[in-house]
Image: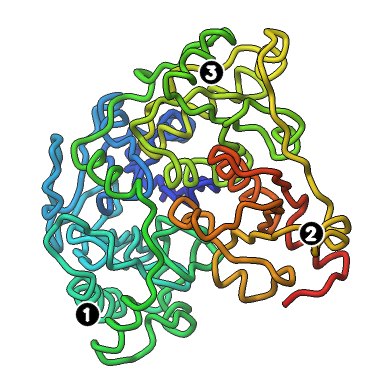
Amino acid sequence: MEFHQFYLPCLAHASYLVGEGGECAIVDPQRDVDHYIDEAARRGLTIRYVIETHLHADFVSGHRELAARTGADIVIGAASDAGFPHRAVRDGDALRLGSIELRAIETPGHTPESVCWLVVEEGSPSKLLTGDTLFIGDVGRPDLAGGRGYTSEQMASMLYDSLHGKILTLPDDVEVWPAHGAGSACGRNISKETSSTIGIQRRVNDALRPMPRHEFVKMLTTDLPEAPRYFPMDAEINRRGARPLAEIEAPPLQPRRAKELIESGAVPLDVRDPAAFGAGHLRGAVNVGLRGQFASWCGTLLSPLAPVVIIADDPAGAAEAVMRLARVGLENATGWLEGGVDAWRRAGLDCATLPQLPPSELRERLGSLRVVDVRNPGEYAGGHVPGAQNVPLAALDRRLGSIERAATAVICASGYRSSIAASLLERHGMEPLFNVAGGTSAWVREGFATE
């Protein structure tokens, strides 16, 4: 059997190739699909099926483009109400690929249409592609079926049945291959491991321990973090199918043209790292660096309706930004600043700076600087700079009124999220601002006390 996991770290997303006998299926593809076509060709396989375990909310799938380019059938659960040509499957339906069988197991709970796929070799189950039903160390959230007529409690109850009545009846040696890893907002306690077995998960996954239904429902529906605001949009894009990635264009822009667009309401999106952004940037630019969870943060913080002008180090960085925005359904890049910040300066246009504050200097200035910690509450509770105010980045726009307009140092774990937050605060007229270089990690490494 041919089997391969593709892993996309910035979205913590796993997709799969599984096949035999010269044919294969691609399961849960990301929006840019060339690497699936290339990998299948390298292995001498024809892509016969494009399988979706469910309608993903955290990224836009490439199922329609991949099917159009290969002639494959798109396969998805019958409860999906999908608006594109597809093969709808129910519990027990099977697909043949040479000598192996892919068997559908309907597992509603994360979404109503969720389907896990059991790989059967020589009559014995060997692998389970679980989508977002079962993760390594966690299970799928039950609150992402918005607009489908179900409450989180109803979905959690369905998930209880799917897990205990179906998945946990499989042999312990069946391998578990989920659609997401650590960092995905589709779960809360996902392990850094990207695969496991039913037996191991039965022992270590807290959500799978024996418990009554009401306890499971309460556990899954209590203190759920707010879903990123782009999730409902992406789920609907996936229901109808996204347009080909090649149709999304963002031309180069001369500085004066970029300035006109920005003055007309376009958001300057600076995708460079925090140090480069700090040294000089377009006033009012939002800094979301390509090296981190770029797409997720852009989807969470930016409106899909407002046009965007990309500021990058080079054309390759601009093109990568446009593609990664499209992965989460943001197709609003109107162009990129040709020549970057240097060209902007040469055109005589105004730039701003964001000083990068070393932890040692922050310690010296604690009495005169307000410290805003933009990590999640759990991170903050684990130790923070004395006196720091916790305003999680995802909630920053709603909590601006709670931040005093005074000299402010913004801190996170590494300096990445804090640079995003500082750029947003700058857009709202707050100054002076400082980004703590290296974040809380650097603060702790230097031996400074935390609360």
Q: Which residue is mark 3?
A: 336
Check disc 1 and give the amino acid type.
Answer: Gly
Instruction: Tell me the distance, in whole angstroms, between the alpha carbons under discs 1 and 2.
Output: 59 Å
Task: State the image coordinates of residue 79 (x, y, percent, origin top left).
Answer: 12, 55
- Identified at 28% across, 43% down, the residue is 233
Q: Answer few, some or many: residues within 10 Å of disc 3's Cα (few below 14, many 20 plus, some between 14 and 19).
A: many
- Identified at 59% across, 48% down, the residue is 421
Check disc 3 and give the amino acid type.
Answer: Trp
Q: Answer few, some or many: residues within 10 Å of disc 2's Cα (few below 14, many 20 plus, some between 14 and 19).
A: few
**Rendered view: 101 above or below 331:** below
Task: State the image coordinates of residue 248 (x, y, percent, origin top left).
Answer: 38, 20
Res 165 label: 1
Instruction: Find numbered disc 3 in the image and state the secondary structure of the residue it sits on.
Output: strand
Decide if residue 421 is on the left or right side of residue 451.
left
Residue 360: image quadrant is bottom right
Say which of 128 and 402 sits in front.
Answer: 402
